[in-house]
Amino acid sequence: MIRKLLISYWRTKPIKKQIKEHPILPPKEGRVVTFTFDGKELQGIEGMAVASVLFMNDIKVFGEHYVDHSPQGIFCANGQCAQCTLIIDGKPLKSCMTALKEGMRIESLKGVPALPSEDEPVPVSNIQTKEVEVLIIGGGPSGLSAAKVLGEKNIPVLLVDDKDRLGGKLVLQTHKFFGSAEDVYAGRRGIEIAKILAEDLRQLPSVEVWLQSTVVGVFSDKIVGVLRENENYVLIKPKYLLVATGAREKMLTFKGNTLPGVYGAGAFQTLVNRDLVKAAEKIFIVGGGNVGLIAGYHAIQAGIQVVGLVEALPRCGGYKVHEDKLRRSGVPIFTSHTILSANGTNKVESVTIAALDENWHPIAGTEKTFECDTVLIAVGLASVDEFYQKAKDFGMEVWVAGDADEIAEASAAIFTGRIAGIKILETMGIDTGENIEQLEQKAEIMKSRPPPPKTPTVFDLEEGVFPVFHCTQEIPCDPCTSVCPRDLIKMSGDSILSLPYFTNEEPCIGCGRCVAVCPGLAITLADYRKDPDFVYVTLPSELGEKRIKKGDIVHIMSNTTEIGDYKVERVRILKEFPKTELVTVKLPKEQAKEATGILVQRVESYSEPMEIYHKEALADEAIVCRCERVTAGEIRKWIRRGIVDMNELKAITRAGMGACGGKTCNLLIQRIFREEGIKDVVPGTPRPLFVEVPLGIFAGTKKEEEK
Amino acid sequence: MTTYDVIVIGAGSVGVPLTKILAETGLKVLCIDQHPSPGQGDNKHAIGGIRATHSQKGKIWVALRSLEILRTWEEKYGEDIDWIEGGYLFVAYREEEERLLKETIKFQKKQGLNINWIDAEEVNELVPGITSEGLLGGTYSPEDGHANSLLINHAFYSQALINGAEFKFKEAVTDIIVTHGEVQSVRTTKNSYNAIFVINAAGAHAQYIANMAGIQVPVMSDMHEAGITEPVKRFFDPLVVDIRPQQNELFGNSKNYYFYQNKLGQIIFCITPDPPQYGLSTQETSQFLPQVSQRLVNLVPRLRNIKVRRTWRGRYPNTPDGMPIVGPVKGVEGYINVVGLGGQGLMLGPGLSEVVARFINDKMTERDQLIFEEFSLYRNFSSQELLK
C-alpha cells in the first residue's frame, strides 16, 4: 500500500529538467512512463531518446570509460560516437538512439559491457537488396531540395536519413533564417523551413523516404548499405547517388575535455530544441562562429544562462547580428581568448579561459574562471564527405551537395541541393531549362563569408515613424525588402549582400512587419509622432509573450551599452509573424535610434582562478581520441619520433580505432601535425562502418517478438 | 653508391622481422617499401592468429619457432603485443569434418604438436554459448594463440632500428639489376642501392618483384575480408575455426571462417570465399558482412548482439600447393625468395626469418636444409595440404 502511494506520488512529480514553456517551441507531449536507472525508479516521456530522458532527470554521468575509468556522458547526441552507451535491458546500446519504453531497466556502463548470454539459436536469412534510380543520403536542406527537383520530373528517388523527421539540422533551429526570401524561404524559422521542404516531398509520388535509416557503408561493388530503422540491413544499388550528409562538429583539445558536460553545440540543440530538456543551468560557449552564437541564443530562449563565450580571433566569425543579439541579452563575449580547461571532479563545475597573444599563446595572468555546468564546443564544422570520397573512388555516378561539399549556411545548402538535382537530371538526358551557371553564381553569393561590419550610418530624420536598421554587415539576406506594404525598404546595391535602407519616399505606416521579419532582429521602429522628445521605440523579442508584458520594467540595451530601465508600453504580435513580439518602450530621443533590445541575463562577475587551476593547463594531458583515450602528449611523442603516416599512428596508439571511427580525433591529430610543422602527412585509410551495427542485423535475424 | 649486405624488399609481416634478425647478426641491412610506413601492405590486414598446428612439416617447424618468439616477446623486450595463448579450436558438426580433423591430428601429434580431439562438452566450456546441437567435438591445440598484427610489426620495426637497420619508405622498387648471374643493385623510384643479397619479401607484389630479376614465381593473390567488433567482456580464449563449406546464392559461397576475441575484448572475424577471388584490391565489398554474419550467429547465437565496428579486405599471396617459396634461385646469385606465404606471413615470418638469416650467414642447420627443400621453388607444386 505504501509502495503504491509512493509510486503515485512519483508519477505526479514533474520531471526535473523539462522545459515546460518555450517562446518558440510547443511543449513536449507524450505519455509519462516509469523506468529504472541503476535500480532507482524514474519517469520519462515514452519514445524520447534515453539519453535525453536521463538529462531530464538531471543524470549526466552515464558510466566510466574502460581505459582510464574516467566519468563518461553524452557527447554527440547524434548516434555517431558511443560515449553515451548504457546497458539497456541487458544490452549495450547507444542511449541517444534508443527510445524510452515503459519499465526499461537501464544501468550505467562501467568498463566494457558483458554480452548477454542469449544462447538459443535464432533463424538467420539473407538481407534484402534493392535497386533504385537515385539514392539521396541525407534529408537536410540540400537533400530535400534535390529530391524535390527530381521528384517534380517523376524520377524514382529513395531518400534516406538517420533521424526521425526530415529537415536535417533545420529541425533544431528556432531562429529565423537569412538568405533570399524568394529562393530559400529567408525570414522563416529553421523548423518551419524543414516542414515546408518535407511537405513539398509528400506531394511527389516518385520520392520514397526512409527515416531513422543510417547509411553505414559505400562499398566497392557500388552498393550502399543502409541500416533501416535500426532493425534491418538493406543493400541498395543506385544508378545515381547524391551525398547530402551535412557536416560534423570539430572538437578541441584542452584539459578536462572529456568531462561529462563538455559537448558540441549540435548535441545541445538536440537536447534543448528537439527534446525540450533543460540540459544545463549555466553554459559557457567556445567559438564565436554562427553555430556558437546561435547556440547561445537558443540557450537564452530556453531559460539557460550563458555565462560567457570565447573566440580565439579578434572578432567573432559569425554574423554580426547574431553576436549583437547575444551581447544585448547580457552575454559577455571574450574575443582573442581561449579555453584553458574544463574543471570538475565528476562533471563540469567551471571553465577557465585566458587571453591570447599574437602568437596564439595564452597570456599568463589573464586567466578567468567561470562557474558553469556545461561547456559547448562550437569551433567549426567539417564536411561529412567520406561516402562521397568512397563512391568516387569506386567509380559510381555520384554528386555531393550542401555542407558535405562545402560548409555554409542552410540557405546555401538549399541552393546547392537544387543544383545537384538539376545536374543529375541533365546527366539522365532530361532537359531542365535551367541555367546552371547562373544558379551556381547565386549559390556562391549564399556561401559568402561575412565581411567585417561597416560603421553604421545614422539616419537624421526625427519626425514621423520609420524603421532603423542596425544591420551593418553585408551578408546574403533580403526579407525586409519583401514585406514592406509600401515598398519603402530597398537595398543600397543590386546584390542580396547589400545593406537595406529606408527610402522615405512616402510616409511609413509603422506596421512593424520589417521589425518582425528580420532574422537578425536588427530592425527597430522609431515613432516620433506623439512626442518628439520621448520616442516610442519598437524592439523585436523572441522570449515569449509571458516573459515580457505590458507594464513590465525592462532594461533596454544598445548593441554596445546599457541604456536603462524603461516601462513596456505595448506588446503586440503580428499574425503573419508569430513568435516574434514587438515590444514598444518610450525612450528619450537621444537613445531612440540606438536601442536594439532588452537585457535578458546578468552574469555575476567571474572569479579569479582558484589555486588548482592557476598553473598553465598541460596541453599534453588533453584527450585527442575520446574513444580510446589517447592524449595529445602521446600523439606528439610519436610525431616527434618521425611518424608521418596516420595509419601508423593509429596502429601504435589506437587513436581512431574506437567506436566513432576517428570522426572526432582525425582533425585534431591533423592539427597536431601542423603544430609540429609537418605538412606532408599521409591520411588514414577510411573503412566502413560509419556507425557500429549489431552483427545479428547483418545476419538477417528476425526482430524478437515484443513481449 | 652505398653497398648493403642485404636489401629486403617489403616491410611487412616477413620483411620487418627479417630485417630485425639480419641486423642483429651484424649485417648492414636496408628494407625498402613503397608504402609510407611499416606494415601498410597486408600486415595490417592480418587478423592475428598464430598457430603451429599445420599439416606439413616445414610450416610446423617454422611456426613453432614463431610462437616461441612471440610468446616471449613482452618478457624479452617489454613491449605488449596483445599475445594470448588461447589455442586454436577447429569445431566439427559433421562426420566428414570430424574424420578430416582426426586424421590431421594423427600427423600433427607425430610431429610433437600439442593437439587433441575434445568432445562437445569441452568445446562448450571453451566457447560458452556455441551451438551444441549437432556438435561432435573438435581439435584443440592450447599452445597456439593470437596477437595484434599491427603491434607485432611495430615491435619488430623498433628492434630493427635499434639494431641499426635502415628503412626507406615511399620508395617503390622499379628494377633489380643482375649481371653475370649475380645480383648487383636495386633501383627504386628515388635511388639505387648496391647489395650482396636481395630478398624478395613483397607479399602480394612478390611475383612482380621476382620478374624484375628475371624470375618466375607461381604466386597469385586472392582477397579475403575481415571485420572487428566493439569490445565486450572476454568470454572465450581460442581462435575458433569452422571448416564447413556453405552455399549462399546471393552473397557467395564460402569455405571456412574463423574468429577470436582479442585482449581488449573485440571479436575479429574472417571468411574464405569459394571460389577464391583473385586480385589485388583492398576495397571492401557489400557481400562480406551478410555472408559471414549468418555463419557467426548460427555458430554462436549470442554474437548477434555484438556491434560490428569496422571491416577491411586483405590479400593472401598463394602458391599452388599452399606452401611458401623460400630460398635462393638458380642462375641469380644473391637473390632470395621469401614469398607465397598464403596469408600466413604473420605466423611464419619470425621463424622463417631466422632460417633465412642462418642461410645468409652460412649457418644452416640440418632442419633448415629440410625446410628449404620443402619450400623450394623447384618442388613439385601438385601436392595439396591435408588441411590449410
Image (cartoon, rainbow, N blue to C red):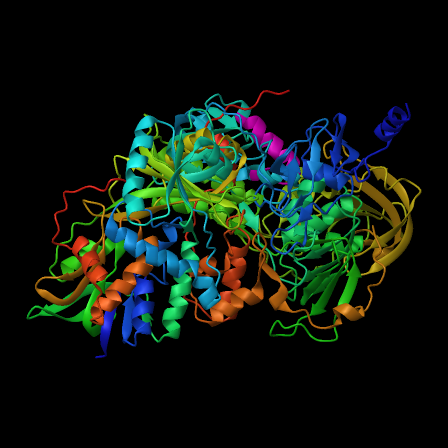
Whether residue A486 is visible, yes or no, is no
Of residues A363 and A141, which is closer to you in this image? Answer: A363
Q: Give the quadrant of the C terminus of chain B.
A: top left
Range of magenta residues: A184-201
Relative to A596, does residue B17 appear above or below in the rendering?
below
Of residues B193 and B241, which is closer to you in this image? Answer: B241
Direction left: furthest residue: B180
Of residues A398 and B270, which is closer to you in this image? Answer: B270
Q: Is B218 placed left or right of A179 in the picture?
A: left
Quarter of the figure with residue B277: top left
Residue at (30% x, 74% y) in the render: B25
User: Where is residue B334 shown, x and y percent of the image?
Assistant: 15, 68
Quarter of the figure with residue A135: top left
User: Where is residue A390 shown, x and y percent of the image?
Assistant: 39, 45
Of residues A523 and B173, which is closer to you in this image? Answer: B173
From the image, give the main secondary structure of the stretch colored magenta: helix
User: Where is residue B363 shown, x and y percent of the image?
Assistant: 22, 70
Residue A331 included in the magenta stretch of the image: no
User: Exactly how many numbered labels are in the figure?
Assistant: 0
Residue A197 included in the magenta stretch of the image: yes
